[in-house]
Image (tube, helix red, strand yellow):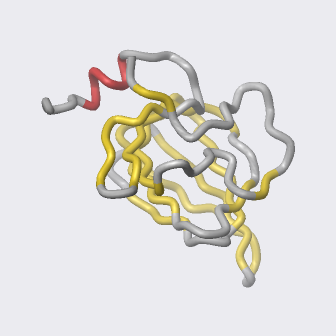
Amino acid sequence: MEPIFLEQALASFTERWSPRIVTTVNDYDVRVAKVEGEHLWHVHDHTDEFFLVLDGELHIGLREPAGERTVVLSRGSVFTVPRGTEHKPYAPVPTSILVIEPSGTLTVGDRHEEVPDHVDATTGHALP
């Protein structure tokens, strides 16, 4: 095992909304992704989803019992979307994120709207 440098991991691919697994901790994947534009409304029924913005800005739309709202995450910000919460990430500028989820979790959740062509419905890819 060797250290993984996140800048090098992010430089190894160009695809947007297509996360790479940088390591696994117990039964959780630590993934990095490059994102820009809209993802899609989706729900993870059985797990929370942790976001850390490494660079750029990430907006996450949330549909909660009290109504709809958006959280804005700048570089260095973290946010956890609670399980069962419908959410839609959006990046107004090129953004790099780190996400922690149970291994095997689909990027489009358990329930989602139609998956657009620019979103990779995956459980994560290995680093090249």
**Residue for point 78% across, 57% down:** 111
Task: Identify the residue at horizontal 42%, vertical 53% (top origin).
Answer: 100
Residue 28's place in the image compared with 8, above or below, is below
Q: 97 and 12: which one is in front? A: 12
Dividing the image into 4 quarters, which one contains the N terminus? top left
Which residue is farthest bottom? 66
What residue is at 55 percent from the left and 33 percent from the top?
Answer: 35
Q: Quadrant of residue 69?
A: bottom right
Which residue is most to the right?
114
Q: Quadrant of the C terminus?
A: top left
Q: Quadrant of residue 32?
A: top left
Q: Position of residue 38 (x, y in %)?
A: 70, 39
Report whether 128 appears left or right of 111.
Answer: left
In front of the other: 128 or 50: 128
| In front of the other: 51 or 100 | 100
Find residue 57 and report its horizontal and vertical position in percent. Answer: 48, 43
Q: Give the x, y percent position of residue 30.
A: 37, 46
Numbered disc total: 0
- Left or right of residue 4: residue 106: right
Residue at (74% x, 46% y) in the render? 40
